Amino acid sequence: MRTLSSQNFGLVIAYLLPRFVALWGVSYFSPTVDAWISASQQNAPTVAGFMYVTLASLAAGVTVSAVRWAFIDQLHHATGIVPPTWKFANLEGKLQGYLTLIENHYRYYQFYSNMLVAAAFSFASRVVSGGLRPSFNPWTVVAFLALELVLFAGSRDSLRKYYSRTQQLLNSRHP
């Protein structure tokens, strides 16, 4: 397995962390998933259990990304962040710059917006499952809403920067 580097850090934050948060939300309704997530050293998952967690995480992550595309991307586009029309014919000689913009802006957009969706799902799962009732604290809701606001603002800023800087890169002539 490769170590965490600048080449794969963006993928970890864009996909892996929101997947885990979404799977955590599923654990409120599934004793099996709860056992996977709360496994201890003495009760470590089997190879099959590890495979189930990996597949469930993958499914949760792809679902979160689809929900993000259906709602968050469309909301940003409807509220003023216009997706640019890029001239990919100008990509020659600029591929490294393009990949850098993806890593420095789009991966963060994916993290913020995917985490916004995954956190909302997990919070709603906890509320519906009765997880907040015994020790309900209104500050928990306030903290959750503040987190969602910050994630939304971060996603909006990252997407705007990604679109703008990629527009500048791809629509300029190669020197």
Image (tube, rainbow, N blue to C red):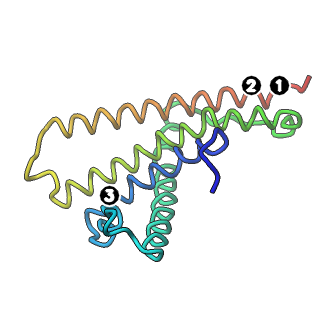
Q: Residue at x 47, y 39 (%)?
A: 112
Residue type at mark 3 is: Gly
Q: On the image, numbered disc 3 is attached to which residue?
A: 25
Q: CA distance from mark 3 to mark 1?
A: 45 Å
Crowd band around label 3 with a 10 angstrom C-alpha radius: few (<14), some (14–19), many (20+): many
Q: CA distance from mark 2 to mark 1?
A: 6 Å
Q: On the image, numbered disc 1 is attached to which residue?
A: 172
Residue 100 rendering spot, x and y as whole percentages:
70, 34
Mark 3: secondary structure:
helix
Counting residues from the N terminus, which is met first, the one under dot 3 or under dot 1?
3
Residue 90 rendering spot, x and y as whole percentages:
86, 34
Farthest residue in the bottom direction? Answer: 48
Q: Is residue 8 above or below residue 31?
A: above
Farthest residue in the top direction? Answer: 175
Q: Residue at x 49, y 32 (%)?
A: 156
Residue 8 rendering spot, x and y as whole percentages:
63, 45
Q: Residue 129 occupies which quadrant of the picture?
A: bottom left
Residue type at mark 2 is: Gln
* Quadrant showing the C terminus: top right
* Quadrant showing the N terminus: bottom right
Q: Is residue 23 above or below residue 79?
A: below
Which-is-in-front pick, marks 2 and 3?
3
Crowd band around label 2 with a 10 angstrom C-alpha radius: few (<14), some (14–19), many (20+): few
Q: On the image, numbered disc 2 is attached to which residue?
A: 168
Farthest residue in the front direction? Answer: 42
Q: Are marks 2 and 1 in contact (CB under 8 Å)?
A: yes
Decide if residue 39 is on the left or right side of residue 82. Answer: left
Mark 2: secondary structure:
helix
Q: CA distance from mark 2 to mark 3?
A: 40 Å
Residue 125 rendering spot, x and y as whole percentages:
26, 57
Residue type at mark 1 is: Ser
